[in-house]
Image (tube, rainbow, N blue to C red):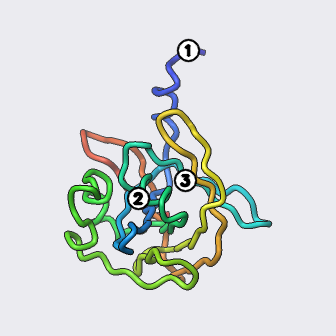
Amino acid sequence: MKEISAGDAFSKLKPELVVFVISIDKNQKPSGLVAARFLKCSRNPPLIAVSIGKESNTHNLITTSKEFVVAVANQDLLPYIEVFGRESGSEIDKFEKTKIEKLPAKHIKSPLLKKASINFECKLEKEIDMGSSTLFLGKVLASHINEGKKMLFNYGKGYGEYIFKEL
């Protein structure tokens, strides 16, 4: 076997499930990002985790609001990945710019994404420092599904473009 850097090895871990992570600011205005680091942690109690870079606006929102939504993407959400994945919510209103459809959550103030395959409403349970990012552990208060919707996966780059496929 050939030894490579951890970063190079991480880039080989494809496909990755595409999720949006949404939270709110002190005025209840939502923002979010697209994340690749999502983990199911426990069924009882139901816990999931997302790893978010410390420099991101969404990191600050989750730290302040103590809540977040994880919305599992599908083909319907593909047009929004560019804005939610590359632009900063501290500089633009991603929801206003994209007109992405949202729904009220049942237990928290952060909104659900209407067209997501699955939405998880989460209350922040724990923050774990991971160096350049924080692992946010959330207790799932409610889960919502769009029956029949597939899930979107990132297969990495091909010819300079990201390759997304539904499974």
Q: Which residue is mark 3?
A: 50
Is 160 drawn above or below residue 45 in the view shown? above
Q: Amino acid at mark 3?
A: Val
Label 3, label 2: how far apart the Cα atoms are: 21 Å
Between disc 3 and disc 1, the foreground one is 3
Going from N to C along the chain, the mark reached first, 3 or 2, is 3
Is 66 drawn above or below residue 143 in the view shown? above
Q: Amino acid at mark 2?
A: Lys
Q: Secondary structure at mark 1?
A: loop
Q: Residue at x 38, y 62 (%)?
A: 32
Mark 2 residue crowding within 10 angstroms, few (<14) / some (14–19) / many (20+): some
x and y percent of residue 48 in the render?
64, 59
Which residue occupies the foreground of this view, 79 or 51?
Answer: 51
Disc assigned to residue 165: 2
Q: Which residue is mark 1?
A: 3
x and y percent of residue 152 in the render?
44, 62
x and y percent of residue 114 in the render?
41, 81
- Tally of numbered tags: 3
> Farthest residue in the top direction?
2
Going from N to C along the chain, the mark reached first, 2 or 1, is 1
